[in-house]
Image: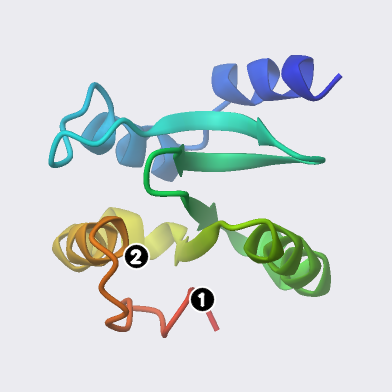
Amino acid sequence: MANEFARRLRRELTGPEKFFWKQVRNRRFDGHKIRRQVPIGPFVADFACFDKRVIFEIDGQSHFETGNRDHERSEWLQQNGWRVVRFWNEEVLREWQAVEEAIWNALHGVRAPTISGSEGPR
């Protein structure tokens, strides 16, 4: 069931997700393989780098209403060995250089703050 849901999400990427994917796909980002809309446990991560165990979430307006659910999801993922880095849609589209730096930092284990804060949007 999660695989079918993930497949549907891959076909229906949002504009910011499409832009993000174009920038990181095919090992274009420092040679790291990043997958899109991938099932991890009971969740589907927007983007994940399995060798570094980092998940990148691209959040839109709907995440204002689901903030508590996002927090619980991030907690579960972190307890299972994943680092979760969140970006707002607008950051991806308008501040790509800062997003790119945050991605590099996450993939290389640097705990520098992202453009949205230490681990994602406020």
User: Do we see residue 3 in this rendering?
Assistant: yes
**Image coords of residue 92 (percent x, y):** 33, 56
The residue at the point 14 percent across, 62 percent down is 97
Position above or below: 82 against 17: below
Quarter assignment of residue 67: bottom right
Q: Compute the Cα span from label 2 to label 1.
A: 10 Å
Quarter assignment of residue 108: bottom left
Using residue 60 as the reference point, say whether residue 44 is left or right of it.
right
Quarter holding the C terminus is: bottom right
Identity of the amino acid at label 1?
Pro
Q: Which residue is mark 2?
A: 91
Q: Earlier in the sequence, mark 2 or mark 1?
A: 2
The one of 88 and 29 positioned closer to us in this rendering: 29
The reply to whether the C-beta atoms of the residues labelled 2 and 1 are less than 8 Å apart is yes
The residue at the point 13 percent across, 41 percent down is 30
Q: Which residue is mark 1?
A: 121
**Image coords of residue 109 (percent x, y):** 29, 66
**Image coords of residue 77 (percent x, y):** 67, 57
The one of 41 and 3 positioned closer to us in this rendering: 41
Q: How many other residues sit within 10 Å of disc 1, few (<14), some (14-19) or many (≥20)?
A: many
The residue at the point 41 percent across, 85 percent down is 117
Using residue 116 as the reference point, say whether residue 74 is left or right of it.
right
**Image coords of residue 61 (percent x, y):** 63, 63
User: How many labels sit on residues?
Assistant: 2
The residue at the point 40 percent across, 79 percent down is 116
